Image (cartoon, rainbow, N blue to C red):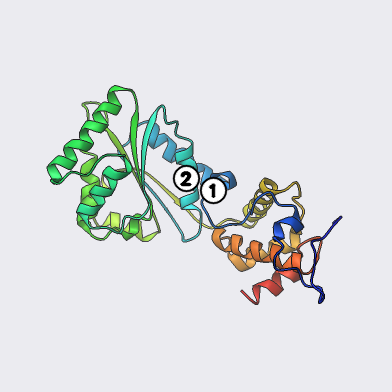
């Protein structure tokens, strides 16, 4: 590399220097936040996105997306939401549904921008009026429930199922997208009346070795002009250590970039990855 950031007398990197400067990063490429800019296409994520988009566009009522921990469910959901034009879709996102059934219904109204109503009948009437108004304007209503496996009780799931009873003669007035960890599938399967409402199902697993390579290169490419920072040997070790789980890939790559800046290397190789992996 042409230049390095200032270092202390012992040769270590000055703690006040952001390591983004060292690698020439416009932003942090491996932050574990669901930023749609860092969505990386791969076969299983693209397939899940297509199915969910299809379910929303055709108003299928209830959709289910599950995935292993750290495999990109939330990022996929945010990309899905960002892709829904506000001129055609009215979208509400419940990010923390660990609530009582009554609180969950209140949160749904809140996320649709509706005021709270004292009675349950009043809440449902208020929501129904919003959904009907959207339909009259040619706008589809979508409710996305992330981390749905933490819904407290069967009654909470029942409240969501009943929301799909808002219908016209030829279509649902609301599409509900349930997103969660694999246990969500088992919880849904244990509620037959809910399970039968699921029209579209998708699941995300870990990346393959090739997808891991593409993932790392694409995220680096979104943050800097350099896509050769991680050697192919380094990527192989990262895949081995992370088992292809996106969240673990992010953590390991981020630590490697920091360690690489401290050590003043021009590339991240397999030996550096192994050293980092031993201390995190």
Which quarter of the rendering shows the N terminus? Answer: bottom right
1 and 2 marks in contact (CB < 8 Å)? yes
Query: Dot 1, crowdedness within 10 Å: few (<14), some or many (≥20)?
Result: some
Residue situated furthest right in the rendering: 2
Mark toward the start of the polypeptide (1 vs 2): 1
Side (left or right) of 278 relative to 149 = right
Name the residue: 58% across, 44% down.
37
Q: Nearer the viewer, residue 273 or 119?
A: 119
Residue 264 rendering spot, x and y as whole percentages: 80, 66
Whether 115 is drawn above or below 265: the answer is above
What residue is shown at x 47% (from left), y 45% (from top)?
78
90 up-or-down from 185: above or below: above
Q: For residue 167, which quarter of the picture? A: top left
Instruction: Please give the residue where the numbered disc 1 appears in the rendered image.
Output: 35
Q: Which mark is residue 78?
A: 2
Label 2 neighbour load within 10 Å: few <14, some 14-19, many 20+: some
In what element is the residue under mark 2?
helix
Task: Identify the residue at the far top of this view.
Answer: 137
Residue 40 in sight: no
């Amino acid at each position: 590399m042409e230049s390095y950031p200032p270092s202390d007398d012992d040769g270590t990197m000055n703690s006040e220097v952001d390591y983004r400067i060292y690698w020439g990063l416009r932003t942090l490429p491996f932050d574990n936040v669901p930023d749609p800019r860092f969505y990386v296409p791969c076969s299983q994520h693209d397939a899940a996105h297509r199915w969910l988009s299809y379910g929303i566009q055709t108003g299928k009522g209830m959709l289910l997306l599950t995935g292993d921990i750290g495999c990109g469910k939330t990022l996929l959901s945010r990309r899905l939401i960002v892709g829904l034009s506000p001129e055609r879709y009215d979208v509400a996102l419940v990010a923390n549904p660990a609530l009582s059934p009554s609180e969950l219904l209140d949160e749904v109204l809140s996320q649709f921008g509706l005021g709270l109503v004292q009675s349950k009948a009043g809440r449902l009437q208020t929501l129904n009026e919003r959904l009907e108004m959207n339909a009259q304007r040619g706008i589809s209503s979508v409710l996305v429930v992330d981390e749905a496996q933490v819904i407290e009780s069967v009654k909470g799931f029942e409240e969501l199922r009943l929301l799909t009873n808002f219908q016209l003669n030829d279509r649902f007035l609301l599409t509900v997208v349930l997103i969660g960890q694999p246990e969500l599938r088992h919880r849904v399967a244990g509620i037959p009346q809910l399970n039968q409402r699921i029209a579209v199902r998708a699941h995300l697993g870990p990346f393959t070795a090739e997808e891991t390579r593409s993932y790392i290169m694409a995220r680096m490419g979104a943050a800097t002009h350099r896509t050769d920072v991680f050697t192919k040997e380094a990527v192989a070790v990262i895949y081995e250590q992370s088992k292809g789980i996106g969240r673990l890939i992010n953590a390991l790559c981020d630590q490697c970039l920091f360690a690489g800046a401290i050590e003043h290397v021009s590339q991240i190789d397999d030996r550096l990855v192994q050293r980092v992996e031993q201390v995190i």
